[in-house]
Amino acid sequence: MNKQEAAAAVRGSGDGAEAGRPSPREIRRRQRIELSREQLLETAEELFARNGYYETSLKDVAEMCEFSVASIYSFFDSKEDLYLAVLMRRGAGQREEMGRLAAEEMPAGERLVAMVRAQIEHRRRYPAWGQLHAQMTKIGGRASGDVPELYRTFYQELVGLLAGVIAEGQHEGTIRPGDPHALARLCSALIDSFTLMDPVISTEPEGIDAEDFLQFVRETFTTA
């Protein structure tokens, strides 16, 4: 460490803020804000999953968090904005994992099953989000025009990744013939249906476990 670096370290150890660098007090303030935002998101996720979008009000979220409704507006412009934030914060990790699996060096049929498994595990890790996503995208769920555009794009990207792997598998001869995008939508709908009856997270389990479901996917979509 040279003299300039040492001097900077000494200055940074005090309570004052270095030019262009937040003070410890400002850092603590930002941390409190982030914790409050996370609490709102966690609570809203639980309420939206349990009661649905239309039956959940900002007042419900505020009361459960012991916040005022006005305080929610300091983080989110509207209920729709809060709803989109709830949906997207879990989606990014799933999209990244699906992209990684789609590019793996293994037969396409195995990749497809691995991608389905990854979606099940992600939803089990975040069960309220998993149920919310399944309710959003299932047949008979929210009208397509009522789904936030950004989230519709995210869902289409997931389907597109599945479709790409299915097309590769058809070329290899490891996945059944058919329109790749239609098969990907069908596969995605099956995952949503399983989520709503998954004994690990569902309030209405139907007695089928993940391995049974994965075997069903394997038998339905692959030729092996």
Image (cartoon, grey):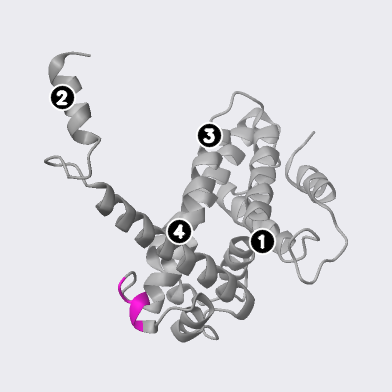
**Side (left or right) of 20 relative to 90:** left
Q: Which residue has dot 1 on it? A: 192
**Side (left or right) of 111 relative to 203:** left
Q: Which mark is residue 203?
A: none
- Classify residue 45 by image quadrant: bottom right
Gap between marks 3 and 1, in whole Å? 21 Å
Q: Secondary structure at mark 2?
A: helix
| First-in-chain label (4 vs 2) | 2
Gap between marks 1 and 2, in whole Å? 57 Å
Mark 4 vs mark 2, foreground winner is: 2
Question: Magenta span has 93?
Answer: no
Residue type at mark 2 is Ala
Q: Residue at x 64, y 36 (%)?
A: 170
Where are the magenta residues, as a range? 70-74
Q: Secondary structure at mark 1?
A: helix
Q: Which residue has dot 2 on it? A: 7
- Classify residue 140 by image quadrant: bottom right
Q: Position of residue 211 (x, y in %)?
A: 82, 46
Q: Position of residue 83 (x, y in %)?
A: 45, 71
Residue farthest top in this picture: 2
Residue type at mark 4 is Met
Q: Position of residue 66 (x, y in %)?
A: 48, 79
- Viewer-nearest residue: 220 or 98: 98
